Amino acid sequence: MAKLKVGILISGRGSNMAALIQAAQAADYPAEIACVVSNREDAGGLEAARKAGVPTTVISHRGYPDRETFDRDVSASLEKHGVGLVALAGFMRIQSAWFPEHWAGRQINIHPSLLPAFPGLHVQRQALDAGVRLSGCTVHFVTPTLDSGPIIAQAAVPVLPGDTVETLSVRIQRQEHRLYPLVVRWFAEGRISIADGQVTVRDIPPGAALLFSPEP
Ligand code: GAR
């Protein structure tokens, strides 16, 4: 069966992108990474994508008169590569309403908190300041509201005494790199459906949509 073509949008380091590229290198993985698009030409992830032989495109948001015109060009680039699923991986541009509506049910995001807690920026700082004992990451469908949209899966990690933004970020990212490839696999296998804003993942072991960090 033809593999699902995934387009990844990045703005920075691209470690989640790299995790997806690595997962897709396995012969039995049901998705392939068709392209990586960055809004920044200095995004570190571009080099890693090129090295892995994944086509990359830079579409700088600078010089566009408005968000939607930029979004339409990004979308056209993804469509040129036959993309069936858009995966945001540290893509730090707010989208116009047009993009998530055009890609409704076909665009996912990963965010470094247990949403709906701590959307937006400085996420680990927010978690530390709130004094939560658990944090983690969330993969969700993208809707026009930032870091919102139906939740597909989450991974929880402890917040430990003495944690800093850096130590908590590292712990969360380790789980991101497990969770994102898993969710893309489920999507490619046709297991994920949404009804009334609630996501169902069919035929997975009970609790598999909530991973707990194996670390202390
Ligand atoms: C990731 O931690 C991701 O969850 C976050 O950006 C980081 C990108 O890292 N995304 C958001 O905050 C989205 N609101 P990466 O470039 O190494 O994948």
Image (cartoon, grey):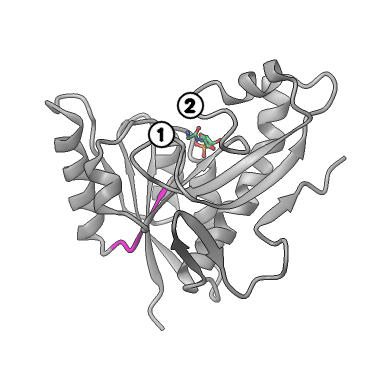
* Mark 1 CB within 8 Å of ligand 1: yes
Q: Position of residue 191 (x, y in %)?
A: 52, 71
Q: Please, what secondary structure does the residue beneath circle 2 have? A: loop
* Mark 2 CB within 8 Å of ligand 1: yes
- Residue in the image at 63% along x and 38% along y: 114
Q: Is residue 210 magenta?
A: no
Q: Is residue 92 left or right of residue 133?
A: left
In the rendered image, which residue does mark 2 sit on?
120
* Mark 2 vs 1: CB contact within 8 A: yes
Occupied quadrant, residue 35:
bottom left
What is the crowding at mark 2: few (fewer than 14 residues within 10 Å), some, or many (at least 20)? some
* Residue 46 visible to the viewer: yes
Determine the main secondary structure of the stretch shown in magenta.
strand
Q: Position of residue 152 (x, y in %)?
A: 54, 55
Q: Is residue 189 left or right of residue 46?
A: right
Q: Position of residue 84 (x, y in %)?
A: 33, 64
Q: First in sequence: mark 2 or mark 1? A: 2
Kindly identify the amino acid type of the residue bearing the numbered disc 2: Gly
In the rendered image, which residue does mark 1 sit on?
146
